[in-house]
Structure formats: C-alpha cells, structure tokens
Image (tube, rainbow, N blue to C red):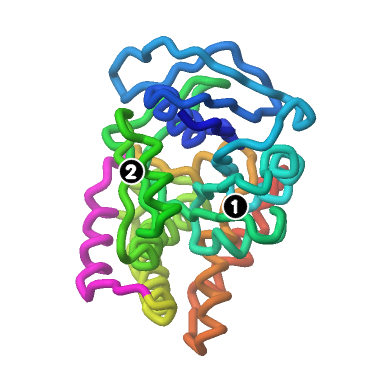
C-alpha cells in the first residue's frame, strides 16, 4: 500500500483518486474546499461507497510516497505550497496534465532531484460537485517505459483505470496534443459545441492547426503517422453535435483555459525548430485575450 496525495480534485484527480482507493492505497485529497463524500463512477452506473480523506491546508500534510499533480498546466505555480508540504527526498511526483511540457513546468516548483513522471491521461470525465465525478466509457493513463513509470502504472492494479508504460511516450503525448489543440481552440473561440465543425471554414482551420501540430511534433521526435490528420479530422466531423471539451467548459464557466499548454506550445516549439506556424500565431493571442471576467 502506498501513501498518495492527490493535488487537484477535479474530474481527473477525483477519478484517479477513486481508482487508487479501489486498488487499496491510502489516498489523501489536497483541496481548498472540503468534501465529505467521494462519488466516482462510469456514466450510467452507481457510484460505490468510498471513504475519503480531504485536507484543506498544506500545513496538515507530510511527505508522501507519491504525489499526483492533477491541476491544470497554468495552475502549477498555485500548487507550490501543496508541493512544498508533500514532496520529500523519496517522493515521486506524477504529472497528470495536458500538453507536452510536463517537466518544464514542474521542475522549477519541486526540490532539485525530485523524480518526475509525466503522464498522458485518457479519462473523459466531468466533475459535477466537490467529490463527485463521472467518467465516460474509458479510463486510461500512459507513462514512459521507465522504472518509475512502471511503478506508477502498478499502483492502479485492481482498479478501473488501465495504466500502462509505453516505449514511445513522446509520440503518444503528441498524439494527444493533436486532439486537444484543434478541438479546444475551435470550441473556446466560437463558444459552440462540436457541431461548429460543420460550419463553413471551421474544419479547414482545425486541419491547419492539426497540420502545424504534426509538423512540430515530428521535429520534437514524435513518430506521427501520415494518416493522422485525416483520421483525426474524421473523428472531429463524426463527433456528437452536442459534445464539448474542457476548453469549452472552462470558457463557459468563466475560468482561464489551457491555451498556453495546448496551443501556444505549438508556436513556441515551432520557433525553436524554424517551423512556420501561422495559424497558431494568429489564434494564440485571441485565446490569451479570453481572460477570466472578459466578456466573450
């Protein structure tokens, strides 16, 4: 049994936390708002009863075996007090976030030498209330095939989360960005659900973002197949019209979106490799301008 702290009890944090409890570990949720119940289940199923431990002040925590950082990429700095309290000399930190810059974002806010385990998360989920989340159809996580990645995946044995190490983590990470970058930007900028992809010109913009992501990802060492763009565009066009994504949901709720981790990264890394990214260069300032409290 491992001693695990979950920082960020959103949809993903609650889902993986519930899975780790099911696997027999001692799990503590670090949260600003306490919740007395943990209700997490697959869509349409009854949530089992789980005992929950929630701590609302960093001073009440001590170093853990594992810390799972489940805040969004732009919230890492705000989690520093929690990390200071829970990361000790032998703590390993798993980073469950969107984007491809897990290490770059977290290294400055943890002690030198801390073992970091970037994680690709595939858990379509939503949180409806503190401690209450629903995942839809699949729940998976991927890590690099390293000793620490294998140890992280082993934590989920016996739970509803499928965890596996992959020999090509870089490619898997960029494949997910190829989903997130076009879909999130289009829905956040238009304020519409996936039906907007059928409006004139929208699919062409999404394809252009996707093409830039593939070009930059390949320059970063990702092995991205030639049919990835057509395959992903077909998925976008076949999506249920009322489907949304987290960028849409955050924008609708007046929260800051992950525009930097999902879209600015393409332009940023494109410049490093001398790859033009004109569409990303255009949409990033528009996404950045959608600050919390600014009418959209």
* Apparent side of residue 214 relative to residue 54 in the rendered image (left or right): left
Considering only order in the chain, which callout, 2 or 1, is on the residue closer to the N terminus? 1
Q: Is residue 110 above or below residue 268?
A: above
Q: Quadrant of residue 46?
A: top left
Residue annotated with mark 1: 73
SS at mark 1 in the image: helix
Q: Quadrant of residue 251?
A: top right
Q: Residue 189 location in percent, x, y?
A: 52, 54
Q: Is residue 201 visible?
A: no
* Apparent side of residue 91 relative to residue 161 in the rendered image (left or right): right
* Apparent side of residue 75 relative to residue 168 in the rendered image (left or right): right
Residue situated furthest bottom in the rendering: 274
Residue annotated with mark 2: 163
Q: Are there few (<14), some (14-19), or many (20+) residues within 10 Å of tag 1?
A: many
Q: Nearer the viewer, residue 56 or 252?
A: 56
Q: Residue 84 location in percent, x, y?
A: 74, 44
Q: Are there few (<14), some (14-19), or many (20+) residues within 10 Å of tag 2?
A: many
Q: Is residue 190 above or below residue 1?
A: below
Q: CA distance from mark 1 to mark 2?
A: 21 Å
Q: Residue at x 71, y 47 (%)?
A: 294
Q: Which residues are magenta?
A: 222-241
SS at mark 2 in the image: strand
* Apparent side of residue 11 relative to residue 178 in the rendered image (left or right): right
């Amino acid at each position: 049994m491992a001693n695990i702290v979950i920082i960020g009890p959103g949809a993903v944090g609650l889902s993986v936390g519930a899975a780790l409890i099911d696997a027999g570990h001692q799990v503590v949720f670090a949260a600003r708002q306490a919740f007395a119940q943990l209700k997490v289940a697959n869509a349409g199923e009854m949530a089992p009863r789980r005992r929950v431990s929630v701590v609302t002040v960093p001073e009440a925590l001590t170093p853990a075996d594992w810390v799972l950082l489940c805040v969004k990429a732009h919230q890492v700095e705000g989690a520093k007090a929690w990390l200071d309290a829970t990361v000790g000399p032998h703590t390993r930190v798993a980073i469950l976030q969107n984007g491809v810059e897990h290490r770059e974002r977290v290294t400055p806010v943890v002690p030198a030498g801390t073992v970091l385990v970037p994680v690709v998360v595939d858990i379509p989920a939503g949180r409806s209330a503190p401690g209450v989340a629903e995942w839809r159809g699949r729940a998976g996580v991927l890590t690099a095939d390293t000793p620490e990645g294998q140890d992280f995946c082993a934590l989920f044995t016996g739970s509803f989360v499928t965890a596996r190490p992959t020999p090509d983590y870089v490619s898997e990470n960029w494949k997910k960005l190829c989903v997130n970058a076009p879909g999130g930007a289009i829905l956040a900028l238009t304020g519409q659900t996936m039906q907007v992809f059928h409006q004139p010109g929208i699919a062409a913009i999404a394809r252009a973002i996707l093409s830039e992501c593939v070009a930059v990802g390949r320059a970063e060492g990702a092995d991205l197949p030639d049919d990835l763009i057509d395959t992903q565009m077909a998925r976008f066009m076949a999506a249920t019209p009322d489907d949304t994504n987290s960028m849409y949901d955050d924008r609708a709720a007046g929260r800051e979106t992950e525009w930097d981790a999902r879209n600015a990264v393409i332009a940023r890394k494109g410049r490093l490799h001398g790859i033009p990214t004109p569409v990303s260069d255009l949409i990033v300032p528009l996404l950045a301008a959608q600050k919390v409290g600014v009418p959209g």
